[in-house]
Image: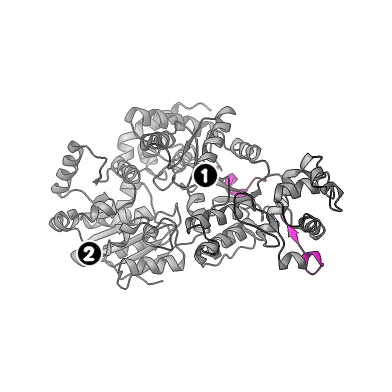
Amino acid sequence: MTDATTSTYSLDDILRHVKAIWGYDQLRPLQEAAIRAELDGRDSLVVLPTGGGKSLCYQVPPLVAGRTDLVISPLISLMKDQVDGLRANGYPAVALNSALTADERRQAEDELASGNVRLVFMSPERALTGWVRSQGRRMGIQHIAVDEAHCISHWGHDFRPEYRQLAQLKADLGVSIHAYTATATERVRADIIEQLHLQAPAVHIGNFDRPNLVYRVLTRNEAKKQIFEIVDRHRREAVIIYCMSRADTERIAGHLNNGGYTARFYHAGMKPSERRAAQEAFVNEEIDIVVATVAFGMGIDRSNVRCVIHAAMPQSIEHYQQEAGRAGRDGLEAECVLLYSPADTVRWRSLLEKKSGGMEGTIRPVDLELLSHMRRYSSPTGCRHRALVEYFGQTFASENCGACDICLGEVDDLIEATREAQMILSCVARVEQRFGMGHVVDVLRGADSPRIKKMRHDQLSTYGLLTGTPKKTLNNWVFQLLDQELLTRTRGDYPLLRLNQQSMEVLRGQRQVFLMPTKTKRVKKTTVEAESWDGVSRDLFEALRTLRSTLARERGVPPYVIFNDATLRDLARRRPKTLDEMLQVQGVGKKKVEDLGLTFLEALLNFSG
């Protein structure tokens, strides 16, 4: 990691503004170094996990230096949320984007012309139209922050070509560029530095571990039941459920609504107005559950997501870390659950083949590599926190994280299942490798079907060998054999099971087979949750939450703009009696005390619980 040069501004200068605007007495790890790089005008790359406070790193410098900086942001919704939150704190910021009316645009430009604005947000497309080159020079913009910088890289999971052209602004204006992302392997980081032409950048990489998140991987067998069990643990809390297909989002949202929850689906096939309505309902806490494809998330600024469920395995660790990382951004406890089936790997391989032109063997090696890493994470081979941290090139010191299913002892060990594997492979051989999984499973279970009788497969030695094994369990075993490449299947709409060299080694007793259990132990309570509620009255927290919702509706802003959950819990823990005492609460700055102090003090003093 490269150290930044020494800034002319003291830490007290920085903290004075942080306390006044955001209500924090200290900075998080690496924030000071990142802020100083911007204050010094030194190119920088900052990688902090979601919830690590990267936004503060580019919001503080222009405030301290009394200048106007530009922020490149990928989504209009993300810009709006950030500007709304900053202005509510008394921070002068504007956004220039296509969603503004003519009057709103004139007002924003007038504010910019006054010289009082500290941050102006825009998309990379708009930044490249010439506005920055003309107006930016006039306003003296010398520093550009690039948010979600992984969008620059071909290796990143959200590649966006326009981001690569931003280096031209550096050449034209001589500005410093500061790239920020929550997700970047060493390969992605190198690509960002190269594509943005960063010169001797200060590189600051935060700790990728999110100790407030509890990671669990469940073998998917009864997905509907499993999702309901998870969601039941988070009633009246925000939950995001990620699915692989649009149809899955609609189906699962329908199940939840029929089960008494209020959920909406979200995917790229919806009309923009429909997507916007679902997103706003979630951000405004009108609903607590969104069932979505990966199209949902980057522009969401709801910090109190208490649970993220993946109904199927995502394509890569990068995707998973970014999506699961949307839980617990306020630093409080949250749960991340992946419902995994080996069928997911098979499905992803099929999708990648279609994406690469439909020809066998044309999948990009990098995509297969990413998929392989994700599959290994999904297996019960070790601590989930350690696996994620080490994937991003860092070390994990703790022997037991106390916050994943492995370390909590919720997962059984892999099952030695060589005999069962031999039965399955032998059945594939007995049907002469001319049938698909459904037929092989039926033969093994001893199904009494006309097709089996017609083919005389009820006369095979493997017929009924696994009678009594649930069909879902047996399907899962076959998919695990496919996933471990102990069995293969043909391409096409009706794939056939085929043996390979590894299959023969298993049949000859030369290779052992281990399978994942299909059942998990009971979920255990974690110390993360207990510590975050220590000294907090839940009844008082809920009363403050209700007040927050009322104020947000009256003002037409998302509830988090009023206060986030961490601040509400600290209010319920400290129970301040004066405005001065309220300033000691985490996340309460001067502007918030002036605006909301008396209202919340009255609620605290009148609470009788």
Name the residue beneath numbered marker 2.
Answer: 175
Location of residue 274 by image quarter:
top left
Left-right relation of 570 to 390 = left
On screen, residue 470 above or below 483: above
Residue name at image x 34 percent, y 55 percent: 147
Left-right relation of 345 to 263 = right
Left-right relation of 208 to 284 = right
Q: Which of 582 and 284 is in front in this view?
A: 284
Q: How many labels does the image show?
A: 2
Could you tell me which secondary element the residue under label 2 belongs to? loop
Please provide percent x and percent y for residue 546: 45, 29
Residue type at mark 2 is: Val
Q: Which of marks 1 and 2 is nearer the N terminus?
A: 2
Q: Nearer the viewer, residue 39 or 259?
A: 259
The magenta segment = 506-534
Please provide percent x and percent y for residue 3: 36, 71
Name the residue beneath numbered marker 1.
Answer: 245
Q: Bin the neighbour count of mark 2 within 10 Å (Cα to Cα): few under 14, some 14-19, many 20 and up.
A: some
Q: Can residue 410 be seen in this view?
A: no
Location of residue 537 by image quarter:
top right
Q: Nearer the viewer, residue 435 or 182?
A: 435
Residue name at image x 45 percent, y 51 percent: 51
Location of residue 469 by image quarter:
top right
Is residue 523 found inside the magenta-colored segment of the image?
yes
